[in-house]
Amino acid sequence: MNRIRQFFRESLDLSIAEAKSAMVLFAFIFLILTVTLTASWFFDKKAGEVIITEFGETALPEKEERKPYFKRDNYPESRKIPVRHFAFDPNQASESDLLTLGIAKPQVRMIVNYRKKNGKFRFKEDLNRIYGFQPEVYAALENYIQLPSRSVTKPGSKPEFSAKPEPYQESQKPGFTPRVFSKEISKFDINTADTTQLKMLKGIGSVLSSRIIKFRDMLGGFTGTDQVAETYGVSPEAMEEIRKYTFVKAPVNKIKINSVSPEKFRHPYLKGYLAKTIINYRKQHGRFNSIADLRNIQTLDEAVITKLEPYLEFD
């Protein structure tokens, strides 16, 4: 024991008290490992005895090899069903009959769904229009289908249905109200339009229509239809519709530059510090007589002045 303690002191550079604590800790860990391994061996042996006793085996069964998830037989359609051919009408055959005939389960499901929607198979060849229906399966079943052949009808006639599964559409959502894009949309004034009118245009939904209205109100109205493109999120497709179906007639709301208070002087084209600069210049130099007076303010560039001019009134 003293040798072990001396080993801990020299190897780990510990004091006598620390060496004793380390010995106790390692002894405790060793005890836990011993108990765990012994218990595991005992319970495994006991489980084996239970299996042998309960099931009458003379030895433990070999451990079953676990298959990867993608190779497991998880789906009913992957289970083998004995194939048997018999005369049938695809308009009346049950789901189990169709499976017995050798038709794959996804195609059986499409046939059943098509019939539920009051669809009807008129000719043998109509089965080939089921999405994914295998040609070899049709060839094997052709003589058993109790329907006339399309070959006796007029050449070039179009099929009366398509049983290809329809992709999930937004219209299948509960409470969905379809939007109809009519070709006969009457032109309207973009400055007086509401969200309902804007949503009639392709590329404009509820969010974008509200955003256009909000930006219009912040500006005080649009001076031209092209100005709508400054709204965040407007696509080229939406702009094409706006140019086609809207116009500007109602005048914009103007700011009285010589009497507006500093608190109410706000506009999307003016940053806050520029608005304060204009008010301060007015206090120092008096009223503005025209847009030319604004050009005397050096911090205002020409682009801002040009965009802001239609919204200013020099009374």
Image (cartoon, rainbow, N blue to C red):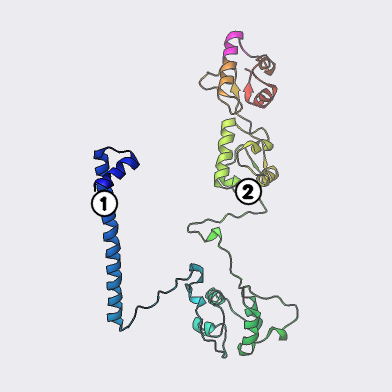
| Mark before the other along the chain sequence, 1 or 2 | 1
Question: From the viewer's perspective, is residue 285 above or below residue 8?
Answer: above
Question: Could one spot residue 123 in this view of the protein?
Answer: no
Residue placed under numbered mark 2 in the picture:
203
The stretch in magenta equals: 280-287
Mark 1 belongs to which amino acid? Ala
Of 72 and 80, the residue lying toward us: 72
Residue placed under numbered mark 1 in the picture:
27
Of 44 and 190, the residue lying toward us: 44
How crowded pointer 2 is (Cα within 10 Å; few <14, some 14-19, many 20+) is rated as: some
Q: Is residue 179 left or right of residue 307?
A: left
Residue 274 in the image, given as x and y percentages of width and height: 59, 20
For mark 2, give the secondary structure: loop
The tag on residue 148 is none
Which image quarter: residue 104? bottom right
Q: Nearer the viewer, mark 1 or mark 2?
A: 1
Q: Is residue 95 left or right of residue 5?
A: right
Residue 189 in the image, given as x and y percentages of width and height: 64, 40
Residue 283 lies in the magenta-colored region: yes
Residue drawn at point x = 64 percent, y = 14 percent: 288
